[in-house]
Image (cartoon, rainbow, N blue to C red):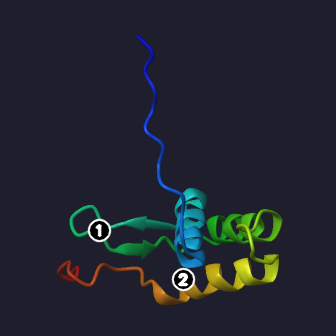
Amino acid sequence: MLMTKERRPAIQTLRGWAIHVLQDAGAIHECEEHGWAKDRADPHARERAFDIARRDPPPRSSPDEAVAEVRDVLDSIGDTCPECPPDV
């Protein structure tokens, strides 16, 4: 019997693409409990994400637009989950 893997839907927005790139590069991750994106504050992972944006921007976007969106997403994400209690 032939088994096929279900395909994931294509990313529809430039912001969604940037989030995917940042996750793949290891620059951001999700809060395990609440699902909020959190910045890992890893400069090497951030640079990998910017390199991907420069070399392989999404269709209909320039490298400059892709880099700007990655930067905008990073600027909008904190290093803590807003729903988790603060560490004391």
**Direction front: furthest residue:** 1
The residue depicted at 55 percent of the width and 75 percent of the height is: 13
The residue depicted at 54 percent of the width and 58 percent of the height is: 10
The residue depicted at 21 percent of the width and 64 percent of the height is: 33
Q: Give the side of residue 55 with respect to residue 83, left or right.
A: right
> Disc 2, disc 1: CB below 8 Å?
no
Residue 68 position within the rendered picture, expressed as x and y whole percent measured from the top left: 69, 86
Is tag 2's residue or tag 1's residue first in the polypeptide sequence? Answer: 1
Residue 76 position within the rendered picture, expressed as x and y whole percent measured from the top left: 48, 88
Q: Give the side of residue 63 with respect to residue 6, left or right.
A: right
Amino acid type of disc 2? Val
Above or below for 18 versus 6: below
Q: Which residue is mark 2?
A: 73
The secondary element bearing badge 2 is classed as helix
Q: Quadrant of residue 1?
A: top left
The secondary element bearing badge 1 is classed as loop
Q: Quadrant of residue 37?
A: bottom left
Above or below for 69 versus 18: below
Name the foreground residue: 33 vs 3. 3
Amino acid type of disc 1? Gly
Q: Quadrant of residue 44?
A: bottom right
Q: How many marks?
A: 2
Residue 35, numbered label: 1
CA gap, disc 2 and disc 1: 16 Å
Above or below for 22 versus 10: below
Above or below for 9 versus 64: above
Give the class, few, some or many, for how many residues have Cα within 10 Å of label 1's Cα (few <14, many ≥20): few
The residue depicted at 43 percent of the width and 21 percent of the height is: 3
Q: Give the side of residue 33 with respect to residue 75, left or right.
A: left
Q: Give the side of residue 3 with respect to residue 62, left or right.
A: left
Residue 38 position within the rendered picture, expressed as x and y whole percent measured from the top left: 41, 74
